[in-house]
Image (cartoon, rainbow, N blue to C red):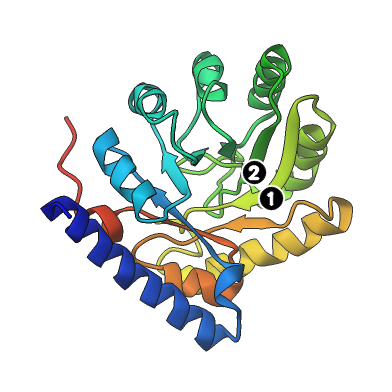
Amino acid sequence: MTDRSGELAANLAKVEERIAAACAAAGRKREEVTLIVVTKTYPASDVRILAELGVRHVAENRDQDAAPKAAECADLALSWHFVGQLQTNKVRSVVGYADVVQSVDRARLVTALSKEAERTGRRLGCLLQVALDAGVSGRGERGGVAPGGVGELADLVAAAPGLRLDGLMTVAPLTGEYAGRQQEAFGRLMDLSTDLRRAHPAANMVSAGMSADLEQAVAAGATHVRVGTAVLGVRPRLG
């Protein structure tokens, strides 16, 4: 085992312990929570090590980094999640490798994703990114649709050819009423998920929680947590 393999194995084990403890504290089964490792800024070699260590879900947030990395790792049995804000001019590339887009937040993006999924014969999973800090613009600081817009956007995704409505995603907001209140933010997302599943029962995925707040997300009921730093280490500064 190389030094990097050993480092990632040790970090993964610590994260696994945290998830297991959070599940136990919440009275949940460990298998109810799926770990997605956010590999942004890290090389394809790390993705290969993670796959060898049993990781099956990885996430990226920048297409210019993700596309070549996914191509280099195309032989691995991985599910690729796109979690960043997505511009429509990047849709063709992202649909080429992503299994799930977790940042669907506007009708124009739904149309573009559907058109490309149909063109390539793919069935693309979609999560609606919910902005719990949405202001009068109806969008959050880091993208997302306001809670009041979830129902309409969900119906649009559910009816779009080539797309599959899988559920909801959020990032704990830095501003607004939920700033610094991760537990309440994730609880609000779970309430929205309950409402969504009344109309779309299969849309039961709830992606919330990262390295710093995965315990609060698990306690609230998240089905997926997105962990980067705690597994791969502190990222180098960009730019």
* Residue 181 visible in this rendered orientation of the protein: no
For the N terminus, the quadrant is bottom left
Amino acid type for the residue under numbered disc 1: Gly
Of helix, strand and loop, which one carries label 2? strand
Residue at 56% x, 66% y is: 33
Residue at 71% x, 30% y is: 123
* Residue 141 visible in this rendered orientation of the protein: yes
Badge 1: how crowded within 10 Å, few (<14), some, or many (20+)?
many
**Residues at circles 1 and 2 in contact by the CB criterion of under 8 Å:** yes
Left or right, 156 with respect to 117, comes to right
Residue 221 percent location from the top left of the image:
61, 71
Q: Is residue 10 above or below residue 129?
A: below
Residue 163 percent location from the top left of the image:
73, 31
Spatial separation of the CA atoms under disc 1 and disc 2:
6 Å
Q: Is residue 154 above or below residue 162?
A: below
* Residue lying furthest left: 3
Residue at 64% x, 43% y is: 128
* Residue on which disc 1 sits: 167
* Residue lying furthest right: 199
Q: Is residue 70 above or below residue 134?
A: above
Amino acid type for the residue under numbered disc 2: Leu
Total numbered labels: 2
Disc marking residue 114: none
Q: Earlier in the sequence, mark 1 or mark 2?
A: 2
Residue 211 percent location from the top left of the image:
35, 62
The one of 20 and 1 positioned closer to us in this rendering: 1
For the C terminus, the quadrant is top left
* Residue on which disc 2 sits: 128
The one of 94 and 72 positioned closer to us in this rendering: 72
Residue at 45% x, 56% y is: 173
The one of 213 and 201 positioned closer to us in this rendering: 201
